[in-house]
Image (cartoon, rainbow, N blue to C red):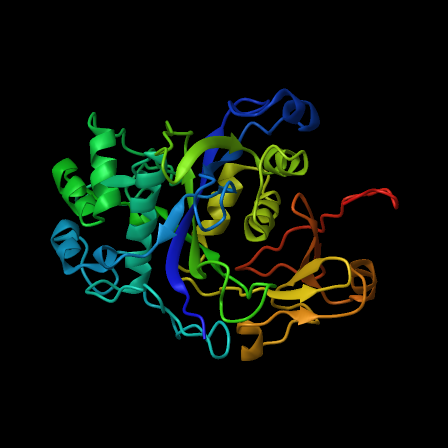
Amino acid sequence: MSAWRRAATVVLAAGWSHPGPGPAATAATATATAPQPPDGFRLLLLQRAGTQRFLPGAHVFPGGALDPADSSADWLRLFAPRYAPPRFGLGPPPASPPPPSFPGLRQGGGGGAEGALPEDVALRICAVRETFEEAGVLLLRPRGSEPAGAGPGEPGLALAPLLPPPELGAWRSRVRRDPRCFLRLCERLDCAPDIWALRSWGGWLTPARPSGGGGGGGPRFDTAFLLCCLREAPPVEPDGAETVAYKWLSPSEATESFLSKEIWLAPPQFYEIRRLETFASLSALYRFSSGYPLEITEKWMPIVLLTADGTISLLPGDELYKKDSYFLENPMSTDKKTEEILKEGKVVNRIAIHSSHLYEIYVSLLSKSKHVYPKNYVVHRSPTAHL
């Protein structure tokens, strides 16, 4: 059976106080996109190098695999004396442990780290480290200071990342070669990873590959999605190795750029971007995420349904979704066409994948206090259009 590598990714949402397209938007995108509200926001999307084994060329949120250095006991002295085990200032423990995300799943396999820090802390350190490696953005706080919004008079909206040190390139190279160097950088700056600014947003598990079982075709990840709201967009510098370019795009701009083939998004990123589209402002997004539990309580493993002419990614809550360990390694299949399946569905939570640049989202589930679903996203296509 496949082993999922534990990983963390950060959805960086930055305030954008003036209307109109972002600095990386094209003229075509600007024309097709309505102006953002005064308190709008944009998302950081990094383009992965075409040489990468996982999602080559895709635009993704910053993040990467968990390393043993992220849960090292050496971090204890950096968080001390204000923050200490078991919670490190992340709030009270959960009332009960979350249920298994999927029967038969080997949690934390293939590269998960065990160490002195609890997993929710280690994953946050991993996310901050990877954001620095890939984008040059430092999500740190002065050592011993209170998290944003915790002190008197603080607006409690977001944070501003630290400016990178002058020797940014050298430090990024060191950290990329040896993740333990990230602790040394934090010690030099007398700062700690701002684990308190990262709010749980969910999680995704890499599904079975349509080409067959056994987990072939690339690595599989058990990825925690974390949200960080920033007052304004920080400077970004792709590392030139894993990432080669970047864009700050609103959710609607990202959708238009994907449909126009300016960027490519994997289905989970597209789904999350459409979730984020439901928030009209950065402050609304921040208020909602602040009500989330700090632990990752809900992670989804899509089940791939191969139709006669396409693919549907089934998500939890969908009437066709089956929590069966068989589908950890194998897709479902049907002789019916995609449109037939879509018309028959009544209780749905699914992504219809018509082509590499054309996805549709169908959701009939009602949003709950701790989870917001995207609105249906259906592209009107000509019956004779070639997909």
The answer to whether residue 295 shows anywhere in this view is no
Place of residue 167 in the rendered image (x, y in percent of width and height, measured from the top left): 20, 28
The answer to which quarter of the image holds residue 372 is bottom right
Q: Is residue 357 above or below residue 346?
A: above
Q: Residue furthest right?
A: 383
Q: Is residue 354 above or below residue 335?
A: above
- The residue lying at 50 percent from left, 79 percent from top is 103
In depth, the one of 253 and 153 nearer the eye is 253
In the picture provided, is 36 more to the left or to the right than 67? right
Place of residue 170 in the rendered image (x, y in percent of width and height, measured from the top left): 20, 32
Place of residue 59 in the rendered image (x, y in percent of width and height, measured from the top left): 51, 40
- The residue lying at 21 percent from left, 55 percent from top is 69
- The residue lying at 75 percent from left, 70 percent from top is 334
In the picture provided, is 322 more to the left or to the right than 108? right
- The residue lying at 47 percent from left, 59 percent from top is 203
The answer to which quarter of the image holds residue 365 is bottom right
In depth, the one of 284 and 151 nearer the eye is 284
In the picture provided, is 308 more to the left or to the right than 1? right
Q: Quadrant of the N terminus?
A: bottom left
Q: Quadrant of the C terminus?
A: top right
How many numbered circles are shown? Answer: 0
The answer to whether residue 5 shows anywhere in this view is yes
In the picture provided, is 41 more to the left or to the right than 361? left
Place of residue 337 in the rendered image (x, y in percent of width and height, measured from the top left): 81, 62
